[in-house]
Amino acid sequence: MDTIKLQDTLPCVFEKRDDLTSEVWHHNVFFQRGQHVLIEANSGAGKSSLFSYIIGHRQDYLGRILFDEQDIRSFRVSDWVQVRQHNLSLLFQDLRLFPELTALENVEIKNNLTGFKSQKQILEWFDALGIGDKINAKVGRMSFGQQQRVAMIRALVQPFDFLLLDEPISHLDETNSRVMGDIMLQESKKQGAGVIVTSIGKHLALSYDKIYSL
C-alpha cells in the first residue's frame, strides 16, 4: 500500500457542527508511504476515531477513505485480514493488551502469528526501553507507561506500510520517548513505511513531513 487518502471525510457525529476548523475533517488529505505525519488535536476532536476508520473498525463517517485509490467501504473481511496483517499496524491509545498475560506473552501472541521478528530482537527492544526486567510480569500489574512500551513492541512485530500511533508517549519520560522514537524510526525506515502520529500535546520528536491540526 502506497497511499491513504481521505476525501471529505467526517465523523457522522460532527455532521451538524458548523464550528469545525479542522485541516483533516471535510478536506482532501493524502498520506504517502515513507512520510512522517503528525496530527495535532484537542481532546474530543476525533483522533482515535480517525484511526478506527482507517483500520476498518468503524464506518460511522461521511466521505471516503481510499487505499491506493480503492474505497475501503468495498473491502470484505478477507481484505481487512490482509490489510491488518501486512499493511497497517496500530498502537491504540488504550493499548488493548491482555492484562492477565505477561509482557512478553502479549508480544509473542502477535509475533507467533507473523513470525516476523526473532526473540533476540524482541528482547533487545525490551532492554532498550528499560523493561527488560518486566518480560515475565503480568501486564495488569505494570504502569501505563510500561504498558505503552510493550504495546509499541507488539506494533512492530509485523510487516506494515503505515504505522499508526495514537498518543504513543503520553505517559513516557523524555528518555524513553526518545528511545521509542529511535526504535520506531529504525523499523519504519527498514520497511519503507509511513508513520502517522496523533497527539493532544506531547508527541514524538520526529522530523515531520506534514503537520495537520485536527
Image (tube, grey):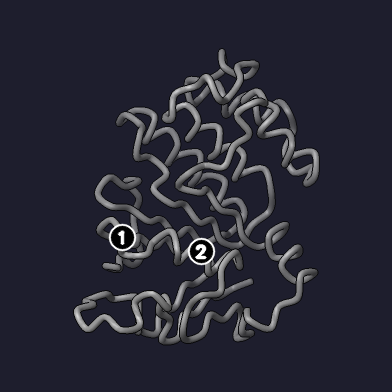
Q: CA distance from mark 1 to mark 2?
A: 28 Å
Give amino acid for label 1. Answer: Gly
- Position above or below: 54 against 139: below
63 or 2, which lies in front? 63
x and y percentages locating residue 96 in the rendered image: 57, 42
Q: Residue at x 49, y 79 (%)?
A: 5
Q: Which residue is mark 1?
A: 44
Give the image location of residue 149, x and y in percent.
50, 32
Nearest the camera: 67 or 139?
A: 139
Crowding near pointer 2: few (<14 within 10 Å), some, many (20+)?
Answer: some
Q: Quadrant of residue 111?
A: top right
In this orientation, which residue lies closer to the viewer: 31 or 214? Answer: 214
Q: Which mark is residue 34?
A: 2
Q: Residue at x 60, y 29 (%)?
A: 99
Kindly state the secondary structure of the residue where label 2 is placed: loop
The quarter of the rendered structure image containing the C terminus is: bottom left
Q: Is residue 68 left or right of residue 91?
A: right
Crowd tier of the residue under label 1, counting other residues whose Cα lies within 10 Å: few below 14, some 14–19, many 20 or above = few
Q: Which mark is residue 138?
A: none
Q: Nearer the viewer, mark 1 or mark 2?
A: 1
Label 1 or label 2, whichever comes before in sequence order: 2
Judge by depth and name the residue closer to the eye, 65 or 195.
65
- Secondary structure under badge 1? loop
| Dot 1 and dot 2 residues touching (CB under 8 Å) | no
Tell me the quarter of the image containing the N terminus.
bottom right
Q: Residue 65, percent across and down?
A: 53, 80
Q: Please give the name of the residue rendered at 68% of the width and 83% of the height, measured from the top-left corner.
A: 74
- Residue at position x 34%, y 62% in the image: 39
Q: Is residue 191 left or right of residue 129?
A: right
**Vertical order, 63 against 116 (above or below):** below
Amino acid carrying label 2: it is: Gly
